[in-house]
Amino acid sequence: MKNFSCLTPTGCGVSAMGMTETHPQKTPVFPEDMVIRVNYLDLGVESLFYAWEISRLLGRDATEKEQRALILLVLATMLTSAGGSTRLPLADGSHFEHALNELDATFEERTAIEELLMKAKRTSGGSPDPLVADLFGCPGEYRPLIIDHDCLYIQKLHVLEARVGGILRQRIMGMPESETASTGSRIAADVESAVDEVFNSPPVIDTFGKIELDAEQKEAVRKALSGRITIISGRPGSGKTSIVASLLRVLARTGSPPLESIALAAPTGKAADRMRQSIAGHLAAIPNPGQADRRLAEACPPALTLHRLLSYLPGLDYFRHNEKNLLSEQLVIIDESSMIDLAMMDNLMRALRPEAQVIIIGDADQLPSIEAGAVMQDLCRAKTANEQGRVVVLKKSYRSREEDASGKSILGAAALINEGRSPAGLNGKSAALMVNRVAELQFKAVEHLQPGDEEQRFHFLAEWLKRLRGSLPDLDDRLMREYLADHSGFDEQAVNELRVILAHYEKFRILCVTRISAGGTGTEALNRWFHHRWHNELKKTGIPLLNQNFLPGEPVLVTRNNYRLRLYNGDSGLVLQVKISDGTRCRPAEPMAVFPRGSSFVAFPLEALRGHLDLAWATTVHKAQGSEYEHVALMLPEIDVRPLTRELLYTAITRAKKAVTIVGSVDILKTGIKRTTERHSGLTDILR
């Protein structure tokens, strides 16, 4: 439970919020019958202890029925927060009812909860009821539970939301009066000259020719040059990186702010690395670059994770940069911002100088953050931000050229899903080719395979592995080869070989809705299948299998940040046979996890990554955010599961550049398309 403090049942006179009890009473009965249920709901038993501790703050005359009702109410609020919302709406009965249904609350328990809420609302409205006086409060009060806008909050989330909303509102409104949505941003003549120069010298790519900015992208660049906050939302491939690169080119010409006062960041290491590569590719494609462009290419600000930008101290669970130690940067550009949760946005906003500019870039239609909050969505929907002209929505996609049949199919399917429609039809034609047998798959554009049984699904996995192995010459030989490294890393020949292999693996990715089984379609089940299949293949080669959990040639994913090794959650690599030389002798080759780092690679013994590594033949859609692949296979669950939503399906399909294969039933797909990710947040109220 990352957002909440939890105390064990000690029986001492200290409440869950650190307040001393004014009316000691007997310890409430711990609801052991709820343990299985909260574990099933992924809340964890610690959340039950937290709710149980809070129930001790009820008045001394509280009955066991009232104590249990309060525990259920706290759990309902925490269940909503675990789903990404910051608050539990009380007025809209359907959401409240859904949470109570999930907790299997009885009719009698629901009646007791309603009675408790009536007392709570009177208390938060200024008429304290002795039974709940120490429990419920209104905004600004220090109570475990806060009622605001007829919604129930855990106190910490209410504080975070109010603080983030206040800072964002100040930034949105803190512009010169001359800047309005109707007149647009007014920028100085020298800046306008630099803008025109950049717009008139776009990069040129052999395949597509000039990559010129369209009207929306130009508007985004101009808005980003003024005001203290700009929000840019666009689907994958809509040119967001071109906007960032163009903005940097303008600033390299004006020198205000200087390049060394600009920070580029993203929520994950992979997203930050993609940001760096995309900007570098954009700059390298400029024909006849000017002096400012050459200087920018040489001294481009590095792309960091948000944790590195804010100097996270893992031992203390603390960020070095905060409101008492502000960042020195005058401009901060954040990519993949849909992944930023409320707590991280709070850390970022508090660490920025009041006069600094921040540019928030992402896709508001993608999956929001795993933790509570949907800040990117809230900002794009905020009336104030839109009225002040601080939001730009990019509608066109350039990832897959629309004149290309495969690209058009992917874009069409994604657009239909985003509109809540099945990709079965696009302007009278099919956006997804329906097939019933693996042999009919062409692995082009968007195809939907409906496996009739489990055997057909395994047949598809075998075909996927066959295509992965067969689409790079001598791949098996490359995977079984021994690679030599010393204290300075791999030599140039090995680096070139590793670059080819890892880039090839990054072209193919199977995406799942969940980690758990879901009828055999979760990442754990699929990775086990691939691992067993690969193990049998390797036994034929006679290679000694020194580690049974991770075999040479298997893709792997880092699951936890390791700051000492500079490996971060989401980093992907490959297990290969590596020999380490100390200059005088060479140790026998052993399977090691190899990861890209900058322009080279690093290798780590598998034992050093124990508990930090998972197989990555298949990953969840959440793990794939911020990535793009040429070929994507989306495995739908055999049964309906809560994470299956329209946003998840849209995110999965838009990870692909060339081909998407949807595997699963049409009915399950339609169920997911109908369900949207609903996150209840008060940011829109604050930014209204």
Image (spheres, rainbow, N blue to C red):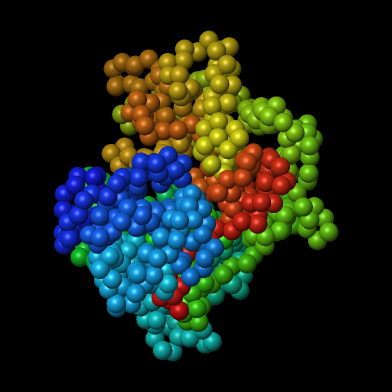
Q: Position of residue 356 (x, y in %)?
A: 33, 71
In the picture, residue 32 is in which quadrant? top left
Q: Quadrant of the C terminus?
A: bottom left
Identity of the residue furthest to the top in this view: 542
**Image position of 485 with respect to 282: above or below:** above
Identity of the residue furthest to the right in this view: 428
Q: Judge left or right: residue 313 versus residue 85.
A: left
Q: Position of residue 353 (x, y in %)?
A: 28, 70
Identity of the residue furthest to the bottom in this view: 178
**Image position of 586 with respect to 573: above or below:** above
**Image position of 282 with respect to 182: above or below:** above
Residue beneath the point at 39% across and 70% down: 118
Evaluate whether residue 336 shows in this view: no
Q: Quick one: 160 or 319, which is closer to the camera?
A: 160
**Image position of 175 with respect to 507: above or below:** below
Residue beneath the point at 80% across and 52% down: 430
Q: Quick one: 610 or 122, which is closer to the camera?
A: 122
Residue beneath the point at 52% across and 32% down: 524
Q: Position of residue 684 (x, y in %)?
A: 46, 73
Q: Quick one: 21 or 561, which is closer to the camera?
A: 21
Evaluate whether residue 520 shows in this view: yes
